[in-house]
Image: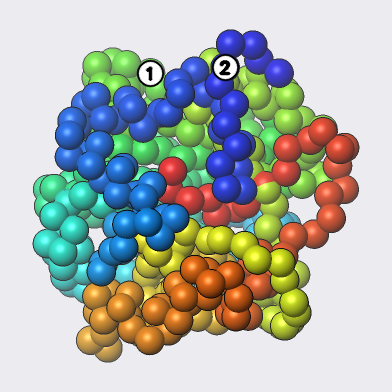
Amino acid sequence: MTPDLKRIRLYSQTRISKYDDPNDIIAEVKGDRYREYRRRFHSSGSGEFRLDFPLDLSIEAVDWCNFECPYCPRATYRGSRTRIDRDAFEQLIDEYAKRTEGLAAVGFDRGEPMLDTHLEDKVRYINDRGIVDIILTTNAVFLSPERSRNLIEAGLTKLHVSIDAATQDTFTKCRGGNLAEVEHNIREFLRIRREMERRIPIIRVSFVVNELNAHEVDLFEAKWANLVDYVEFQDCVDHSRIDRLVDFETEPFHCQYPFQSTSITANGDILACCSFYAKHFVLGNILKGDSIADTFNGRQMVELRRSFREKKGFHIVCKNCRKQPPSSSSSDAILVTPKSIHA
């Protein structure tokens, strides 16, 4: 473990950073509007502050990934290669910016967003509409110096890079590809950010802990903790039931997603959350005229939030997402989720 770093357990991940909260860096740049967004983010997740419109929007730019991580559902289904419709995307962002007054987050995740060659234009479109938090989750394979500079200039606030390994051997087992290339791209991004004299986007590298890589937790931390803004070790979600949901009794638990988030797939589906299991919880489709406002306040979401407030009657999708496999790593290892909240 690296000394003099803050370690905080949040939901299903452990964050390690030089900072008490890396979001403070963005707040120093963006000011009170960003601070108010974060206040609403925290209070809405617990249900304390009730929203009539989500402030955390997840968008799938491309339904495809260039990797086949064995603990991800895309190992068996790479995707359809569908790209989100441009006009629908712009209408979605326009509505979102207006309803939230920009005090919100838009995250590009699911699949590999950088397969969209127009991604930087989308980031710029969101930023131009005054949305204060724009997040990109990527494997960094396509994070060239040119695209790094373009993303920074476009207004990206957070770059999340999923790595899951500290050595090439483990990277091959977990992800495939060339680890040295990915690490080079991240270091180049850091260099360009310094060269441009920018403090944001802040950079996170993440590590989904599982039986293939648990032995490299300390090595990964040592490699990155003093380079990037924060490191995140994530619990590995069990996706073995992704195509055959099982109903079972579960202990009471809380999930913040239904209170503050919604997710849009590349084909326009509106999902209850960004979990892979949410493919079984489709609320509507933006290409068919359904709106975020109507679905977020519709019967299904109202009932879903009620179940978490009352701690009973959980939806079968939530039960299967929540249920975790037993740890196969050492008792003191940190365990974790491919889909981490936009924190």
As measured in the structure, the alpha-carbon distance from the residue carrying label 2 to the one carrying label 1 is 22 Å
Question: Residue 5 — which label?
Answer: 2
Give the quarter of the image for residue 295: bottom left
Residue mark closest to the camera, 2 vs 1: 2
Q: Is residue 32 left or right of residue 51?
A: left
Above or below, 170 relative to 278: above
What residue sits 23% from the left and 86% below the top?
289
The image shows residue 161 at horizontal and vertical percentages of: 50, 39
Q: Amino acid at mark 2?
A: Leu
The image shows residue 171 at horizontal and vertical percentages of: 71, 39
The image shows residue 87 at horizontal and vertical percentages of: 18, 72
- Give whichever of discs 2 and 1 has the lower sequence position: 2
Q: Indicate the quadrant containing the N terminus: top left, top right, bottom left or bottom right.
A: top right
Res. 63 visible in picture: no
What residue sits 41% from the left and 28% below the top?
22
What residue sits 65% from the left and 24% below the top?
221
Question: Residue 191 — which label?
Answer: 1
Taking depth in this image into account, of 66 and 334 the one nearest to the observer is 334
Q: Indicate the quadrant containing the C terminus: top left, top right, bottom left or bottom right.
A: top left
Q: Amino acid at mark 1?
A: Arg
Label 1 residue SS: helix
Above or below, 294 relative to 27: below
The image shows residue 214 at horizontal and vertical percentages of: 79, 38
What residue sits 21% from the left and 69% below the top?
92
Above or below, 135 relative to 67: above
Taking depth in this image into account, of 46 and 331 the one nearest to the observer is 46
